[in-house]
Image (cartoon, helix red, strand yellow):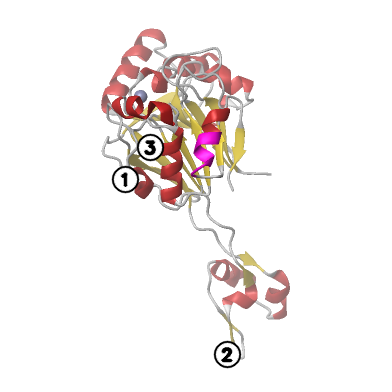
Amino acid sequence: MAYFKVHFLGCGSACPTLFHQPSCQVVEYRDRLYMVDCGEGAQTQMRRMRLKFSRLGHIFISHLHGDHFLGLPGLLSTLSLLQVSGSVTIHIFKEGAELIKTIMSAVCRDTSFEIKYDIISPEGGETVYEDNNLIITTFPLYHRVPCVGYLFREKPKSRHLNSQMLDFYKVPVKDRPLIREGADFITEDGLTVANERLTRPADPALSYAYCSDTAYNPRVAVSVKGVDTLYHEATYLAEYETKASARGHSTARQAAMTAAAAGARRLVMGHYSKRYEDTGAFEAEASEIFPNSIAATEGMTIEMI
Ligand SMILES: [Zn+2]
């Protein structure tokens, strides 16, 4: 079963439609949930997708346009109504933290859990979360207001032990953690056994980049170079390229150009303008440049590969 997935809760842009919800995703990594942007209705979308509220510990906000963070007061109030315990950390710009604090003090003063605020920089380049397996960093985007993307990267993994070979060379249990990390083994007779004889290669460390609202800019590809799965906004099709850049947005074609330049393995698009009811044209346009392109829709889950 996959341990690293992304759930798409909202794939529309600023103006709500009957087809799309505002921006919201949940990255699932092992037993934890990490929300990225929090458009209105995030909590009902979590319910629809059977994502457990108690597993949500961090929320990352890309910028302070309403369709990316106005879901916070409702979501936080719902978590409190449900008596969720522990803490939720909101990674957000300073002005956003002040705004949410003010709203919460008016609508839900005593939450059942602690709300922590991590003030992030609009410049990007920060590590905003790190544990033994996962690291999350920010990078700059190019929108009408300060905006950052989030890069989720697994840390390099240990090699797999080959138990038959370990038994053959009588490797003591106490030496095995070091061998998982790549050490050779020296037998009692002084013979060096190369690590490659005792282990199999580690699984690849996977990565996911979230490119929220941004005009096309070649620097984005540099920031996410080598990412496995790239989410990139595609508010418009190429027919509206001039309008897209004027509004700090991208087209499907430009999202594909970034995916290709970054050497990504897969592109996922979202943040569609209200003028589009069908997402098929986004896949068709992007695929001409970057074949492995998917248009996300609400309710979709993808496993990291
Ligand atoms: Zn925006």
x%, y% of residue 288?
52, 42
Location of ligand 1 given as a quarter of the image: top left
- The region drawn magenta spans 284-289
Tell which tag, 1 or 3, sits nearer the viewer: 1
Counting residues from the start of the chain, the first of labels 1 and 3 encountered is 3
Query: Is residue 287 at least partly visible in the picture?
Result: yes
Mark 2 or mark 3, whichever is nearer to me: 3
Q: Which residue is mark 1?
A: 219
As drawn, is 103 to the left or to the right of 267? left
Asked if the residue at label 2 sits under 8 Å from ligand 1, the reply is: no
Residue matched to label 3: 149
Q: Position of residue 171 (x, y in %)?
A: 65, 76
Q: CA distance from mark 1 to mark 2?
A: 53 Å
Within 8 Å of ligand 1, the CB of disc 1? no
Element carrying mark 3: strand
Give the residue at mark 2: 190
